[in-house]
Image (tube, helix red, strand yellow):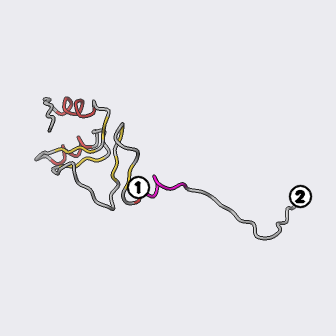
């Protein structure tokens, strides 16, 4: 099943694409890659592929969405940030001299 929504012009198409509660992955197909890149920067999605399918995953790249799509990013260094807690731990080994 596929849903196709029509719009005329960049602004109308961006409004349709961004008017969603979800934003995992998008794709733009265009002969004008500079125009596609400018549109991609305005799309509200975690991932945007230009002239490629939305289903594209590489282990070293962060994969995640925005809005109601998912719960953060995983893959590559994004996994470290989202699945770990940075902590500071100190250990005093022996007596400490306090000058007061």
Q: Picture coordinates of residue 58 (x, y %)?
A: 28, 59
Q: Nearer the viewer, residue 70 or 12?
A: 70
- For the stretch drawn in magenta, what is the main secondary structure? helix
In the picture, measured across the screen, residue 61 lies left or right of residue 39, that is: right
Q: Residues within 10 Å of mark 2 (few under 14, many from 20)?
A: few
Q: Nearer the viewer, residue 1 or 45?
A: 1
Which secondary structure lies at badge 2?
A: loop
Q: Picture coordinates of residue 54 (x, y %)?
A: 21, 48
Which secondary structure lies at badge 1?
A: helix
Query: Which quarter of the image is occupied by the C terminus?
Result: bottom right
Check if residue 9 falls in the magenta segment. no
Query: Which quarter of the image is occupied by the N terminus?
Result: top left
As drawn, the residue found furthest toward the bottom would be 94
Q: Quadrant of residue 22?
A: top left
Q: Residues within 10 Å of mark 1 (few under 14, many from 20)?
A: some
Q: Magenta segment, which residues?
A: 79-85
User: Is 64 drawn above or below residue 77 in the view shown?
Assistant: above
Q: Quadrant of residue 91?
A: bottom right
- The answer to whether marks 2 and 1 mark residues whose Cβ atoms lie closer than 8 Å is no
* Image label count: 2
* Residue picked out by circle 1: 78
As drawn, the residue found furthest toward the left would be 31
Q: Picture coordinates of residue 14 (x, y %)?
A: 23, 33
Q: Picture coordinates of residue 61 (x, y %)?
A: 32, 58
In the picture, measured across the screen, residue 19 lies left or right of residue 2, that is: right
Q: Is tag 2's residue or tag 1's residue first in the polypeptide sequence?
A: 1
* Residue picked out by circle 2: 100
Q: Give the alpha-carbon distance from disc 2 to disc 1, as whole Å.
A: 45 Å
Residue found at x 29% / y 47%: 47
Residue found at x 41% / y 59%: 77
């Amino acid at each position: 099943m596929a849903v196709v929504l029509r719009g005329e012009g960049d602004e109308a198409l961006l409004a349709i694409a961004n008017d969603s509660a979800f934003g995992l992955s998008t794709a733009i197909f265009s002969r004008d890659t500079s125009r596609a890149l400018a549109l991609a920067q305005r799309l509200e999605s975690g991932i945007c592929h230009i002239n490629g399918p939305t289903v594209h995953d590489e282990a070293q790249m962060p994969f995640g969405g925005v809005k109601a799509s998912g719960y953060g990013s995983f893959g590559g260094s994004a996994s470290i940030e989202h699945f770990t807690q940075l902590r500071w731990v100190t250990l005093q080994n022996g007596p400490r001299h306090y000058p007061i």
